[in-house]
Image (tube, grey):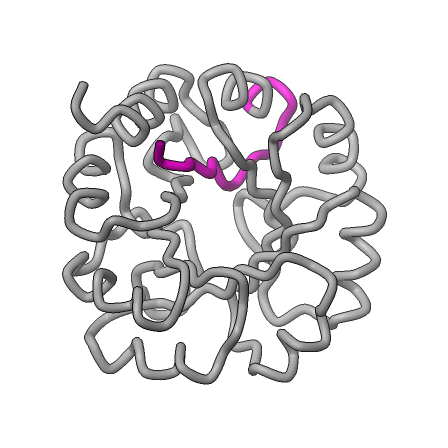
């Protein structure tokens, strides 16, 4: 069954709704964003999550020691790197489960993946000046080619309406959604989350 991460969680209500609807992971953004949370807010939300739900810290070109400090404070063990972090930077975070994000426009954008050894690659859409959460899809046929580099998590413009098609084309390990299930930036919509998770997890339903 497809794994689903709901990213950009900013409050306990959305977190609990997402979990109740079947989300496997929740993303907490610690970089500049309309969905940014403080480590104190994230810690409070995470402390009330049930077992087997993975909190993920999302960072953009943050200092390694700062990432470690936030993750230790919040009890986060999975780190999503959404900036221009180089392979050595990823190595310096050894001990954490690492998801390295890449923004994709064309096939050539996949070539840098060969230099990295994270636990998974997250493929997102390229929008100039924006590191994620754009709500804009990219050509999923390109993402399908990324399997040769490692585990693929698909993101970028996913919605309840297109997630089935995206999964059918890419066959990713997991899908990641933020703006596609929101009423406004940082505020999730329970109905949209339910439809997204159902459509992602039950492909034949």
Q: Above or below — where is 96 with respect to 133?
A: below
Asked if residue 60 lies left or right of residue 41, the reply is left
Q: For this rendering, which residue is in front, 153 or 44?
A: 153
Q: Above or below — where is 94 with respect to 158?
A: below
Quarter of image, res 161: top left
* Residue at position x 66%, y 42% in the image: 37
Give the residues drawn in magenta, as a range. 1-14
Residue 140, given in percent of the width and then of the height, sits at: 18, 57
Is residue 11 a member of the stretch shown in magenta?
A: yes
* Residue at position x 76%, y 52% in the image: 71
Residue 41, given in percent of the width and then of the height, sits at: 75, 35
Quarter of image, res 122: bottom left
* Residue at position x 22%, y 61% in the image: 144
Q: Above or below — where is 174 with respect to 151?
A: above
What is the number of callouts on the image? 0
Is residue 140 a member of the stretch shown in magenta?
A: no
Residue 143, given in percent of the width and then of the height, sits at: 24, 62
Q: Above or below — where is 3 with respect to 23?
A: below
Residue 111, given in percent of the width and then of the height, sits at: 32, 83
Asked if residue 18 lies left or right of residue 139, the reply is right
Q: For this rendering, which residue is in front, 95 or 132?
A: 95
* Residue at position x 14%, y 61% in the image: 141
Q: Quadrant of the N terminus?
A: top left
Q: Quadrant of the C terminus?
A: top left
Q: For this rendering, which residue is in front, 99 or 136?
A: 99
């Amino acid at each position: 069954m497809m794994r689903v991460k709901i990213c950009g969680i900013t409050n306990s209500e959305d977190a609990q709704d997402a979990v109740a609807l079947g989300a496997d992971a929740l993303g907490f953004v610690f970089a500049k964003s309309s969905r940014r949370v403080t480590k104190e807010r994230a810690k409070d939300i995470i402390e009330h999550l049930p077992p087997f739900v993975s909190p993920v810290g999302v960072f953009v070109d943050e200092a390694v020691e700062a990432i470690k400090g936030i993750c230790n404070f919040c009890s986060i063990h999975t780190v999503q790197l959404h900036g221009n972090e180089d392979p050595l930077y990823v190595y310096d975070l050894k001990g954490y489960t690492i998801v390295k994000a890449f923004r994709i426009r064309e096939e050539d954008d996949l070539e840098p993946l060969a230099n990295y050894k994270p636990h998974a690659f997250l493929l997102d859409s390229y929008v100039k000046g924006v590191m994620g959460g754009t709500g804009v899809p990219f050509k999923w046929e390109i993402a399908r080619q990324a399997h040769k580099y490692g585990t693929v998590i698909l993101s970028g413009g996913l919605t309840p309406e297109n997630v089935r098609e995206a999964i059918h084309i890419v066959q990713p390990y997991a899908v990641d959604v933020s703006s596609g299930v929101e009423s406004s930036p940082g505020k999730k919509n329970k109905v949209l989350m339910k439809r997204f998770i159902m459509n992602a997890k039950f492909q034949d339903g």
